Image (cartoon, rainbow, N blue to C red):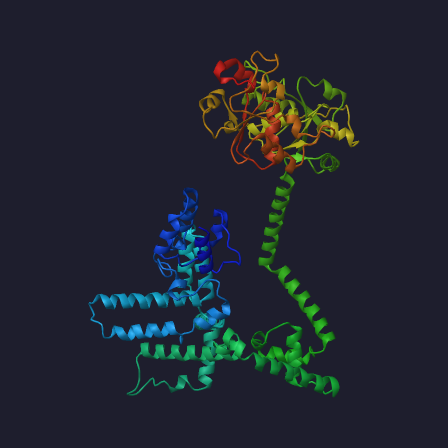
Amino acid sequence: LQLAVSKLGRECSKTTSRTKLLTYEELLPLRYQCHTLPRHEELVLLLMNLRKKQLKIFILFILIHPINALLPGLYCGERICYDVLNLTRNATKKFRVKFLKPTESWLESCILIANELRYINENSEAKAKAEEQFREVAVAYETLKDEESRKNYDYMLDNPEEVYRHYWYYYRHRVTPKVDVRIVILGIILLISIIQYVSSWHKYEDAVKYMSTQAKYRLRAKEIAKERGFLSDIPKTGKKRKDKEELRQEEEAIIIAVIREFADIRGGYEKPNLSATLAGSIILLPVYIYRWLRFHVRWFWKFTIQKQEYGTEEKLHLIRKYMNMSQAQFDCINDNEKNDYLYKELWIKEKFSVWKQKKDAEEKQKMAESGQYKRMRRYLKKGMQLISTIRRRAYHTIVNSSWLAEKLANSNEKNLRILHASREGCGDYAEKHIPKSVCFDLKRSQNKNSPYNFMLPESDFFSKYVGNELGITADDHLVVYDSGTSAPSLELAARVWFTFRYFGHKSVSVLNGGLFNWMKEQNPITKDQPEVEKRNYTCREQRSLVVTYEEILNNLDEEDQQIIDCRAPNLFRGDTTMSSISGHIPGAINVPLTRLVDPDSKLILDKDKLISIFKNAGVDLHKSVICSCNSGIQACGILLILSTLGKKDIKLYDGSWTEWSQRADPENVEVD
């Protein structure tokens, strides 16, 4: 085995001065470095003296020979390209470059093979064998000559398991065109230039067609044609006279020809020129640079050094420069107007500034007197009023104390209504509350026909209670604050927030931290109760925001149903006697509301912390969520917080554990 390893090592160019027995792990890196195994006779002699344990190791080494890495159809097929050319992978780059030349012996052999093909019978096996040899040598040469191809080939030998990668890199290398990047850039420039030139011609033709249909351009073109004698040459009498249609067509052709020339002369629509394309600009760039330098050097010499007087062209150049016009735009100005500029000496900077101010004032006056401008002003005024209304009605789900204090100080906030959320009665409201707030009693507004406490009210009762007793309309912006001063100081306000959302009220916000944080920041409180004016309130129930007992029961086995129970952990686990039946809904996840609120400030935690708490509890924020608690109040706090995180697919189980514990079968109650 040692002799075999030593021989294989020498053939793989991996041998050292000392020969030792290699383990399988040490043999593994050599598996694709070796390209020729010992002859069959030598292997037989070596294997005769091997023990069984050693035999297994040696056979493993034979089985991982690089021929197993070869894929049919790729490179040299089932032969190794290095063997075809009698090269080793460890040969230096200099040696490979010297060897892989088209004048070397192996390529001459290919030429000899090709010459022999002429004398071999066309249908003979010898010709097919010679063609195969020629193809193998040529493919091996092409594979190892190119650096990228050889690199991919070596990677295939070393990583035979990545079959799809080898096919991808092989065909990508073959199909990808090998074009010089300079040719690609040149082709792109030429393509852009052709598109520019063709597009310019289309624009020019469209402009000529448009001008030929306008009366002022046609009349001017006829005048020019008569002045130049084009129309007088048309015979209208005699033997060569033409009918009316021919005369009309010929006259139309003359008018279009004059318009083409006139438009080109005035500079409004110049004829397309190759020099204006990208390729032309690049070619003529040295000429443009030379002209620019010559113009500025000449200008500096004549008018700065020698103090010469400006000529007409120089004066017009300065006027065009002050007007920020291109040469084509300036050429469109008629001669009379240019003469007026010269008469007013507008090439002088001070006089041009005075003229510009006067011109702008005249344009503003003219615009103000035009009916179109007045209509636009009225339109913009209405639009700005609409925008300001939208901004005024825009609201955030969570607001802070400073925001509310600023709104209370603003007398223009007529649609702002503040609600003091109370669980039972308004005794705490009578002692202290935020100025201008009214009391919302959850106990009084609950559903009187439900066997469970604090269920959502009926729409008729709610509309009367909110409109008549609280003086609220559907267009008001409501800000609800929690009246409690113990943790979490959120659930009551969140319940009122959800109740209004359930009945279709759009603008509802919750004061972060409630009355506790409002007083902590030393904002004013009062005992005075505002007068309430009766209003009409219309309810639009959103039944999709609430799920029933039957819906949860029917979907207990569904993976998409995700229930969050926000009760205290001991209630969730079932180790208390507070309820007739302890435990939780099967599959529910416990996220106590108290963990989502800071215990000191009563403020909702930051977004990142909230997301981390939900994820650690096992809540998938990408799925829909059903929130539950004991009686549907605390669950609204979870709904509120999820809403601030941007979730839309959230629902409330209004009956919560109170209903589930009384209606569910024992097997549908889990206890941890």
Q: Is residue 191 left or right of residue 529?
A: left
Q: Quadrant of residue 594?
A: top right
User: From the viewer's perspective, is residue 153 above or below residue 430?
Assistant: below
Q: Can residue 535 be seen in this view?
A: no
In the image shown, does 444 or 124 lie closer to the viewer? 124
Q: In this view, does 593 lie to the left or right of 60?
A: right
Q: How many labels does the image show?
A: 0
Q: Where does residue 116 sit, x and y in percent of width and height?
A: 27, 74
Is 315 situated above or below 637? below
Residue 253 visible (yes or no): yes
Q: Quadrant of residue 611?
A: top right
- The picture places residue 203, in percent across and down from the top left corner, at 46, 70
- The image quadrant where one finds the C terminus is top right
Measuring from the top left, give residue 630's x and y in whole percent: 59, 19
User: Above or below — where is 488 with respect to 302?
Assistant: above
Instruction: Identify whether 556 is placed above or below 8.
Output: above
> Which one is nearer the viewer's eye here, 29 or 516?
29
Percent coordinates x, y for residue 59 in the rendering: 40, 47
- The answer to which quarter of the image holds residue 438 is top right
In front here: 640 or 434? 640
Q: Residue furthest right?
A: 522
For the residue pair 286 and 303, the one nearer the viewer reads as: 286
